């Protein structure tokens, strides 16, 4: 709620003038009165050309003029600012705040309501849509406009995805993928318990707590027989946890890597080559046969294409005639003397 400025600007001797003081005998006219204006330290005073006060603050022979226009202030209402007196007209011209709504100065006899360095007359401080007064009421600001809570809720507040009612400002709400819920409406579809800040799993526009989802919807890993709640892989139409889908030999995870299988068991390429791939007769390394690797096969022996060379001159024999001498292969030129 906005703070009030200008409280206590009442006339001397009135019931509201709680700080009024009198000099001399009871019932005498006030000689110099002041009221404190909280934020700006302004004092509202009256001077009367009477000599009935015991100790008048201003002698009748002294001048008491407006600091701006130099007009006499005797018998007139004035305002003190930084210990300088001003007539009401000069003060309002020089220092009074301008109302945001009507654009007129907020005079000394008006209440000045302020919010974030903006000021309003009390009568001008109202909702920009329904025009109801916002004095002593909660309100919200949107794009420099002041709105009562009802108008703000109708215009800008989110609607609960579950109950379709407005989520009032200041109410705790849950948000997920652009949708909003009251905290009490964000519940598990199966057990109807509030989810709050706990983990949940959405399915078919419904939200489930993790235990209920595992019971109702989750597939079970073919390896460990436990529910698969997030991620997972499918191999030969069977579900696996990522961490359960590993090489049969070295137990490294295969998810995201190339692998092959033998007798329905999955192997990484390194383990498969070490265990089952044929060995090159030239370099003795495995020939995987994967990824388009080309090799030569002759009499139950295999060579990588790059390794199928003449034993003596190292000439490539791929696509050429060759001779054999025991375990060696030779080009026709090197083998003509055999």
Image (tube, rainbow, N blue to C red):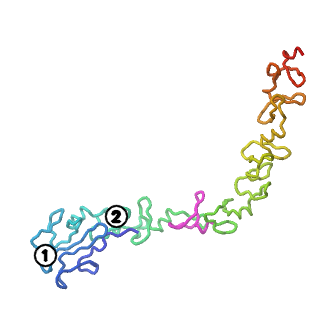
Relative side of 196 to 325, left or right: left
Residue behind mark 1? 49
Above/below status of 300 relative to 33: above
164 and 34: which one is in front? Answer: 34
Q: Secondary structure at mark 2?
A: strand
- Which quadrant would residue 130 be assigned to in this image? bottom left
Position of the N terminus, as image quadrant, is bottom left
- Closest to the camera, between mark 2 and mark 1, is 1
| Numbered badge on residue 119 | 2
Above/below status of 140 relative to 303: below
| Numbered badge on residue 101 | none
Labels 2 & 1 near each other (Cβ < 8 A): no
What residue is shown at x 79% (from left), y 44% (from top)?
Answer: 267
Q: At which x and y percent is residue 306? A: 78, 27
Above/below status of 278 relative to 4: above
Q: Secondary structure at mark 1?
A: loop
Q: At which x and y percent is residue 223? A: 79, 54
Position of the C terminus, as image quadrant, is top right
How much space separates mark 2 and mark 1, taking CA atoms?
A: 36 Å
Q: Earlier in the sequence, mark 2 or mark 1?
A: 1
Relative side of 46 to 239, left or right: left
- Which quadrant would residue 43 be assigned to in this image? bottom left
Highlighted magenta segment, given as a residue range: 164-186
Residue 172 highlighted magenta (yes or no): yes
What residue is shown at x 79% (from left), y 22% (from top)?
Answer: 316
55 and 273: which one is in front? Answer: 273
Q: Quick check: can you spot residue 86?
A: no
Q: At which x and y percent is residue 141? A: 43, 62
What residue is shown at x 90% (from left), y 23% (from top)?
Answer: 326
Query: Main structural element of the magenta stretch: helix, strand or loop?
Result: loop
Q: At which x and y percent is residue 36? A: 27, 72
């Amino acid at each position: 709620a906005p703070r009030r400025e200008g409280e206590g600007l009442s006339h001397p001797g009135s019931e509201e003038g709680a700080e009024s003081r009198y000099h001399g005998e009871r019932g005498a006219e006030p000689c110099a009165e002041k009221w404190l204006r909280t934020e700006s330290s302004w004092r509202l005073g009256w001077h009367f050309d009477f000599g009935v006060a015991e100790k008048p603050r201003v002698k009748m022979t002294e001048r008491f003029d407006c600091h701006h226009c130099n007009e006499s202030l005797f018998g007139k209402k004035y305002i003190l600012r930084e210990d300088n007196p001003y007539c009401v007209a000069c003060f309002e011209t020089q220092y009074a705040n301008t109302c945001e709504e009507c654009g007129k100065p907020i005079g000394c006899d008006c209440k000045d309501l302020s919010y974030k360095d903006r000021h309003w007359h009390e009568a001008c401080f109202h909702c920009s849509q329904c025009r109801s007064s916002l004095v002593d009421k909660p309100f919200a600001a949107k794009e420099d406009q002041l709105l009562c809570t009802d108008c703000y809720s109708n215009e800008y507040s989110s609607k609960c995805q579950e109950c379709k009612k407005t989520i009032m400002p200041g109410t705790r709400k849950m948000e997920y993928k652009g949708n909003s819920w009251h905290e009490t409406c964000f519940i598990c579809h199966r057990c109807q318990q509030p989810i709050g800040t706990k983990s949940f799993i959405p399915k078919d526009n419904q939200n489930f707590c993790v235990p209920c989802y595992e019971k109702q919807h989750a597939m079970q890993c073919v390896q460990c027989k436990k529910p698969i709640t997030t991620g997972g892989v499918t191999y030969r139409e069977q579900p696996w946890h990522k961490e359960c889908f590993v090489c049969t030999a070295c137990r490294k995870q295969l998810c995201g890597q190339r692998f092959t299988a033998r007798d329905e068991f999955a192997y990484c390429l390194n383990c498969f080559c070490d265990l089952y791939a044929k060995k090159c007769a030239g370099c003795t390394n495995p020939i995987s046969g994967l990824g388009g690797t080309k090799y030569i096969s002759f009499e139950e022996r295999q060579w990588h294409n790059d390794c199928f060379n003449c034993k003596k001159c190292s000439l490539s024999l791929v696509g050429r005639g060759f001779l054999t001498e025991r375990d060696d292969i030779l080009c026709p030129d090197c083998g003509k003397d055999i």
